[in-house]
Image (tube, rainbow, N blue to C red):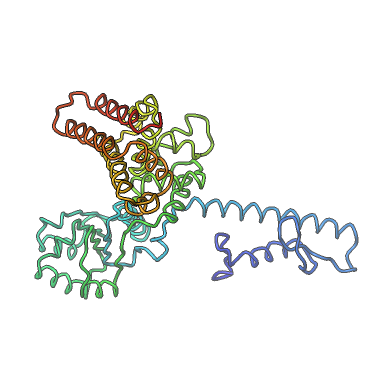
Amino acid sequence: AGRRGVVDLADEEHDAVFEEQLIDRHLSGALVGRARAHGERYPRCGERLSCSRRLAEQTEAVRISWNLHEARKDRGNAQTRALYDASMAASGPEASHRIIVLHGKDSFLRLEWTRRLREALREKFGGVDEFVFDGATVPLATVLDELRSYGLMAAHKLVIVDDADAFFGVEDRRRAMERYAKEPMAEATLLLRSQNWRPGNFDKMVAEVGLVLKCEAPGDADAARWCISRANAHHTMALEATAAGLLVERVGTDLARLDSELGKLAVAAGASGKTQIDRACVIDLVGASREEQAWEIQEAILSGNSGVAAAKVADLLRISRAPEVMIAWSAVDLARKIHAAASLRANGADDGAVARELRLWGDSTGPILSAARRLGVAASAEAFRVAVDGDRGLKTGLSPDPERALVGLCVLLATRFGDN
């Protein structure tokens, strides 16, 4: 139990105590055994109890057990909806911290930690005056004056310095802030935010009165779990685990981008009557990664079907919003690989050696080697020249209609590389 006999239902360690206190109010028998239906304890009454009383008490025990089961289920859902992030496993900013440093490339985490700090300060002090300065331009005296002066309306101040690495770039400023860190004002909280940060003596001093927290994007697995919780908690839409994995694969682990995509997916899923975001929704609405897009266009060209190649180019440009430069690069890269493979084969290399030399792998290996065998050195060299000329035309503005030029290039290569 908690202090003063208070039991916290949100604390799993208090489950047994809470259960015992509840049932003891209704049952006179000892608590032994376990009810198989819900995993909760049930009473076995002594012989002194009548059968009717035993039945009534067991019925009451089942009712209480079910209520506990429902309460724990609700608590589990709340925990699932809680914002998850691997880098937030450690303790974050608290109202008792007088200096906090948030540094790292993930802007979403910096803003999220700022929001949590702001809420903690308001909960403890009530009104909080907030001042935000640009570290690249603000004078040292302005920051120190704001920290050391008392607020007129609110009981506490939150002083934020963005681009803090630039602010600390001058040695005199760093030393002055180190002196402040030795005796920070209790009426003010200093929050330093920066993408880059050089650790030093100031960090050691901050550790005594506050926190230095690195805000970096999580790994793929942690980002996928974060997406599932974020979708449920902030976008009121469940997210399938497979859909979360595909979303991270296509977007990356930048939490700001992931959150933006989750908002779009949640709206689309709700509009279509779905109760959750599934893998199909991610495939339809989230553009493929550069690697996927490159292979998609190369696969279409290797099919030898001009219609398939033309449709894939249009799909990538109009739906996936793939860059024109990327599509042209993919076509040139494919032509280069086929010509290189043909040249290596002409010099006596077998398929295994060619694949290792050109670092071919996956489903593309067979079609590329097949096209190289079929075309030979001369024909593959001509196809490579055509691809390079098409790419040059796009980059120099010689092609007034880029989409038409890309479709024409990919269709031409498909007719040359295809097994016809």
As drawn, 206 above or below 274: below
Q: Quadrant of the N terminus?
A: bottom right
Q: Is residue 168 visible?
A: yes
Please tell me which residue is depicted at 15% across the width and 54% down the height of the picture.
134
Above or below, 283 against 212 in this view is above
Q: Is residue 176 left or right of residue 13?
A: left
Residue appearing at x 90%, y 68% in the figure: 47
190 vs 126, nearest the viewer: 190
Q: Quadrant of the C terminus?
A: top left
Residue 414 rendering spot, x and y as whole percentages: 34, 30
Examine the image and state in which quarter residue 146 appears. bottom left
Q: Measured from the top left, where is residue 133 in percent x and y?
A: 17, 54
Q: Is residue 69 toward the left or the right of residue 334 in the image?
A: right
Q: Nearer the viewer, residue 414 or 347?
A: 347
Q: Nearer the viewer, residue 7 or 296?
A: 296
Q: Residue 391 in the image: x percent, y percent?
A: 21, 34
Residue 275 place in picture, x, y as percent: 54, 36
Residue 15 falls in which quadrant of the image? bottom right
Q: Residue at x 56, y 54 (%)?
A: 76
Quadrant of residue 156 in the image? bottom left
Residue 401 sits above or below residue 194 on the image: above
Residue 316 shown left or right of residue 402 in the figure: right
Residue 287, can we see it?
A: no
Give whichever of 60, 341 is nearer the camera.
Answer: 341
